[in-house]
Amino acid sequence: MHSISYDPQTALIVVDVQNDFVADGGYFHQVGGNVGLIQQTAIQPLLRLIDEARNAGVLVVFIQAIYDAQYLSAPMRERDQRTSRQMPKCQSGTWGADFYAVRPRPGEPIVIKHRYSAMINTELDALLKQRVIKSLLLTGVATDTCVEATARDAYFIDYYVTLVEDCCGAMDEDDHRSALKRFARDYGPVVNSSEVIEAWQRGPARAKRPAAEPAIAS
């Protein structure tokens, strides 16, 4: 069993923490999602985890969904029509696409994605391999869709994946809890951010990673 040591071969992946998925007035809020729960339970632990990752020299990668019309496939359009959720979301350059609360620092990678999974048709895999990353800590929104899809696809191409349960959120609590159960059964450990931070703080001092230009996939 792989030990969860959070060494320099680990990256913290922050998925889709954007206004359309977390903020009042964003897409999730307008289609009935409980964004208040995400705001109240996941954001502060996530902000602390990001700060502690930086202190520990752990790479933080920010994933940003962009769903402009030209990136939507026929199956995606059919899904939106079938579920009556054709409202635009995460359009380039809009408030909805901007990050909520989290702010990448200069040199921290930002990976753009156009599907649930940040591993599909993006530069994320190449970026991680370039940094010799083998283990991923998954956080963000939504636990049962984009976070899970990213982790699942990473697992399928042989990354160790760990889900940080108090740094994730979904449109409702049942979806969040079901995803946690499924993840622990099928993909990797589910942990609390306090466990991660304690492991980092117990570990030896680590050199800071060199800054890199943001990795952006279109």
Image (cartoon, rainbow, N blue to C red):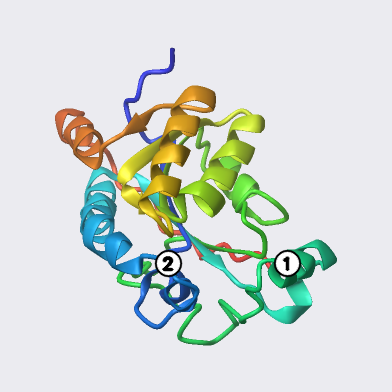
Tell me which amino acid carries mark 1.
Arg
Name the residue rendered at 60%, 51% in the picture: 124
Judge from the rendering whether residue 192 lies leftward or rightward of residue 157; answer left or right: left
Label 2, secondary structure: give it: loop
Q: Residue at x 42, y 36 (%)?
A: 180
The amino acid beneath tag 2 is Gly
| Residue sitting at the far bottom | 94
Pinpoint residue 5: horizontal percent, then vertical percent.
32, 26
- Where's the C terminus, which quadrant? bottom right
Which quadrant of the structure image shows residue 51? bottom left
Question: How many numbered marks, from 0 up?
Answer: 2
Please give the residue where the numbered disc 2 appears in the rendered image.
33
Q: Which quadrant does the N terminus fall into?
A: top left
For marks 1 and 2, the one nearer the N-term is: 2
Q: Position of residue 195 (x, y in %)?
A: 22, 33
Q: Which residue is mark 1?
A: 82
* Residue lying furthest right: 74
